[in-house]
Amino acid sequence: MDPVQNANVLLCITGGIAAFKSVSLLRLLVKAGARVRVVMTEAATHFVAPMTFEALSGSPVCKDLFHSGGAGGESHIALTEWAGIIVVAPATADTLAKAALGLAPDLLGCLLLAARCPVVMAPAMHTAMYLHPATGANLETLESRGVHLVPVGEGDLATGHGPGRMAEPEEILEAVRGVLSPRDFEGVRLLVTAGPTREPIDPVRHLTNRSSGKMGYAVARAARDRGAQVILVSGPVSLPPPPGVVVERVMTAREMHDAVHARYEEIDVAIMAAAVADYAPRDVSSSKLKKSSTPLTLALDPTPDILASLGRRRLDAGSERPFLVGFAMETEALEARARDKLERKGCDLIVANDISVPGVGFESDTNRVAILSAGGGIERLPLMSKYEVAARLLDLVAAGLGIEGGRGRDARR
């Protein structure tokens, strides 16, 4: 399950131009299934009307110690007892300074002092303010106290261009997921493949498929959030690299095969989510092939079977590591073909999805899969986000590894 789902999130908005981006952040949190209450400083209300956040969250906005949306009694205490996580976005220079000094002149200051839950802050300010030594010292102080800081970006600000731009809402949501996730994969070294491969025909043409890489990237993010050391071997995709993940870019099936096997000795888990081309042109032209009126015939040779080669290598070594997960994309006889693939290629688990179903598989943000195990078990998941699918898959990987509290390869030997 997505760790944000059913979480009580206290979203705190302070007075900066980046407050408009907090509307999108609220939408993302609600879409992910969080229960969100919003706190706004007086300055924040000059940038975005409280009514906007009330409409999107379904709850009154809390604005001061004495009228905090019906919390009642010691409102800041009631709110902190309700909150599972506090997110301050944007966190202005003034907010950071007050928090570092432990000042409580308003509702937000009291909330931060009384908080017993994780706190995430997304700084946002003018470049000169961000680069001032005082701000740097305040950030260091807050981080030393366990506050989770979302790094600023560099770009266009209200005035000028430079560092100090608040992270994008999607990045803040990722940070929240990371904080709320169980850290049961601490010390586990996990490799994921993602995306398509491209097999060149000539300098301008290639054979490929529709894979967007979204499923593999979701697995990489979910594993990172749970504390794993993640290596992502990615074919050509348009997705941004997940922060905190080692990304190796490849183009062809041969390059992906070699990159995976180069990491074989150091990994505990291999999750092969890439849609690897099954065939590649036998001869690659060094110059562009010219169009003619006659048919063109391409001779195709099989590409390396990465999943099967990992299974054979593990069998030859007489080892149970790395724990091996495959993917099966089918258009018919889904579970039967997935079971056959699991057995032929020596997998521990295989994730099967019918790519002919709308909203499933290639290019979509959702997936509906069946996860089959070598022991004969099967778990059929409903349509859900690819991150949620990844989270459930990792639950099954953890069970297969016998992870208790997160232990790596050396601890399990």
Image: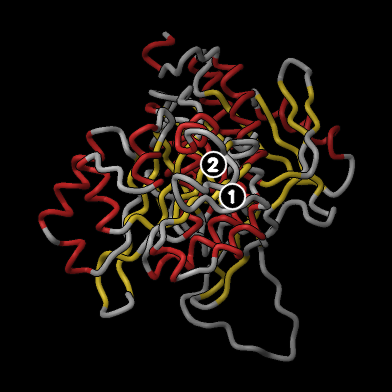
Taking the image as shown, residue 281 lies to the left or right of residue 155, namely right
Between marks 1 and 2, how big is the CA–CA gap? 8 Å
x then y, percent, for residue 272: 58, 39
* Residue at numbered disc 1: 29
Extreme left residue here?
133
Q: Residue at x 56, y 37 (%)?
A: 72
Q: Residue at x 38, y 23 (%)?
A: 187
Quarter of the image for residue 34 reads top right
- In contact (CB < 8 Å): disc 1 and disc 2: yes
Q: Is residue 10 visible?
A: yes
Taking the image as shown, residue 375 lies to the left or right of residue 28, namely right
* Residue at numbered disc 2: 9
Q: Is residue 224 visible?
A: no
Residue 392 against residue 327 in the figure, above or below:
above
x then y, percent, for residue 127: 22, 68
x then y, percent, for residue 234: 49, 52
Mark number, residue 366? none
Q: Earlier in the sequence, mark 1 or mark 2?
A: 2
Residue 221 against residue 338 in the figure, above or below:
below
SS at mark 2?
strand
Residue 17 against residue 102 in the figure, above or below:
below
